[in-house]
Amino acid sequence: MAYRRGPQEPVPEEETIVWSCTNEQCSCWMRDAFSTENKTICPICKSEMAQETRVLPVIS
């Protein structure tokens, strides 16, 4: 089996609004597009989540 090892195309990225957990021990976050509420609760630790902006790969 052969693998292609040529140059990879760069993945397009853009600034995206995300919800991040406010608990410092938890690293959970989710894109705002996948959130159903204005103020969300962390699905992992049940802490409050705050909005922030991150540069992430574009999802089609």
Image (cartoon, helix red, strand yellow):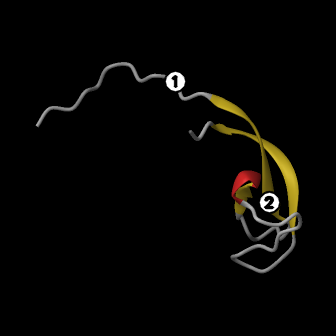
In what quadrant of the picture does the C terminus appear? Answer: top right
Q: Quadrant of residue 54?
A: top right
Q: Quadrant of residue 13?
A: top right
Residue 16, horizontal then vertical, whole percent: 76, 41
Q: Which residue is mark 1?
A: 10
Q: What's under tag 2, amino acid-wise?
A: Ser
What kind of element bears circle 1? loop
Q: Residue at x 71, y 75 (%)?
A: 43
N-terminal of the pair, mark 2 or mark 1, is 1
Q: What's under tag 1, amino acid-wise?
A: Pro
With 10 as the anchor, is 43 left or right in this view? right
Q: Residue at x 14, y 32 (%)?
A: 2
**Disc 2 crowd, CA 10 A, few/some/many (<14, 14-19, 20+):** many
In what quadrant of the picture does the N terminus appear? Answer: top left
Q: How many marks?
A: 2
Front residue of 6/49: it is 49
With 17 as the anchor, is 11 left or right in this view? left
Task: Determine whether 1 is above or below 46 in the image.
Answer: above
Q: Alpha-carbon distance for marks 2 and 1?
A: 26 Å
Task: Determine whether 57 is above or below 18 in the image.
Answer: above
Q: Which mark is residue 1?
A: none
What kind of element bears circle 2? strand
Residue 32, horizontal then vertical, whole percent: 76, 54
Q: Which residue is mark 2?
A: 20
Q: Quadrant of residue 21?
A: bottom right
Task: Determine whether 15 is above or below 44 in the image.
Answer: above
